[in-house]
Image (cartoon, rainbow, N blue to C red):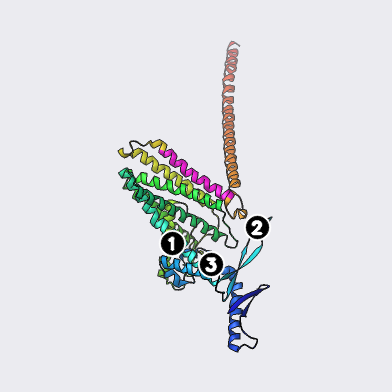
Amino acid sequence: MLTVLRDQGQCWVRAAGTSSGSSAGSREQLQDHVDSCNNGSQKASNKDRRDSSAMEMVKTPCHASSQQLCVTARCFEVLCIYCQSGHIEEPYVSITKKRQMPKNGLSEEIEKEVGQAEGKMFTHRSAFSRASVIQAFLGSAPQLTLQLYISTLQQDITVGRSVCMLLSLLSIVYGALRCNILAIKIKYDEYDVKVKPLAYVCIFLWRSFEIATRVIVLVLFTSVLKAWVVLVILINFFSFFLYPWILFWCSGSPFPENIEKALSRVGTTIVLCFLTLLYAGINMFCWSAVQLKINSPDLISKSQNWYRLLVYYMLRFIENSFLLLMWYLYKTDIYMYVCAPLLILKLLIGYCTAILFMLVFYQFFHPCKKLFSSSVSESFQRWLKCICCHCRWQKSSDSVGKTDVRSSGDRDETPSSSKISSMPSQILNADDLCSA
């Protein structure tokens, strides 16, 4: 049995049960394992980044055969790997390097040995995450909207339907939560990220309020204006579907060819279209924490774009308010016993509550908040200062303008008064001349 030992940054392979006079073939085998282990230790961080990046959503992992298995077979294989992981000695391991969160301005680098069993478990975990996101926004989200729409028209909710709607909502919230965790791991893949339980609770509340209010608004609008909802869906869908492609075309970057070696140019285009389809489906119901960047090798933007986040929630709040206003103006008799203003107020407050939980998460519970250039509170204070400075500057400019107008008016009045006062003197002088 071959095991890997590590001494002062160098990997060595030890053969159990071999004597000093081993054959040339066994020595060559040992040397091959040493070389492979050393290469793995040197390229560990790059491999870990590739595994934890956005290719987690589109790339085929190294364990390609397991990707073709169904869910039941995959679960069975994961269970077998987990049960055998502590009993079978790993033939070789790879070394990964991660940096800890900075403390007092210092960040230490830690190393971890990853065996074959753990690597396969990571592959299966990535597959489960992708499947949960796809199932949530391309399956559960339309199903929840349809079930709530039918219940609204029938004015009746059965126990079975309510259970289905609750499960669909939890599925969507879980998919959105996985997107948040995936975005954090992609943007800070050099660090050992540990998400606390309170962070999960905060994300869960944030996504629950956001998705629930969005679905209810769409259902209310659809129940009174069935034809116009198609226009709303198409505008939302094509806006988010074409946005990554527009940024890619404007950048002038070449077409990405490194997604998968086995894929042709047509296959790569299909994969990218499916990825943008999923991206549009997510943004239809909630904010996609993972931002696509087609011209990037990882297909994901690693920069924290607060401006894009602010614009999204402002536009979404305006859209929800407009849809609720249209529902209020064209509501039918099925809402006879519903207090429409109170319902609108509750939905808007619910959406604002989701934004509040989002701000609390980024301010207090984000696992990498120490790496932010500025916190949420500091950005909010700067925004208020900019607004106050702009208001002061506008008031000062208005006061200066009024002062200029008054001064110009005084200047216009002064010559006219002198002319009026000079006329009697001229008349008197003429009379004096006549009398003389």
Q: Is residue 158 visible?
A: yes
Position above or below: 95 against 359 = below
* Labels 1 and 3 touching (C-beta < 8 A): no
Q: 249 or 191, which lies in front? A: 191
Quarter of the image for residue 396 reads top right
Q: How many marks?
A: 3
Q: Amino acid at mark 3?
A: Arg
Disc 1 residue crowd, few under 14, some 14–19, many 20+, Cα 10 Å: some
| Location of the C terminus (image quadrant) | top right
| Location of the N terminus (image quadrant) | bottom right
Q: Amino acid at mark 1?
A: Ala
Position above or below: 300 against 206 = below
Query: Looking at the picture, how far across and down is residue 156, in whole percent?
Result: 32, 44
Which residue is label 2 attached to?
102
Which residue is label 3 attached to?
50
Residue at 63% in and 86% down: 19
* Labels 3 and 2 touching (C-beta < 8 A): no
> Is 357 one of the magenta-colored residues?
yes
248 sits to left or right of 145? right
Residue at 47% in and 52% down: 287
Query: Looking at the picture, how far across and down is residue 77, in whole percent?
Result: 46, 69
Pointer 1 or 3: first along the chain: 3
Tell me the magenta residue range: 343-364
Secondary element at image label 1: helix
Which residue is label 1 attached to?
131
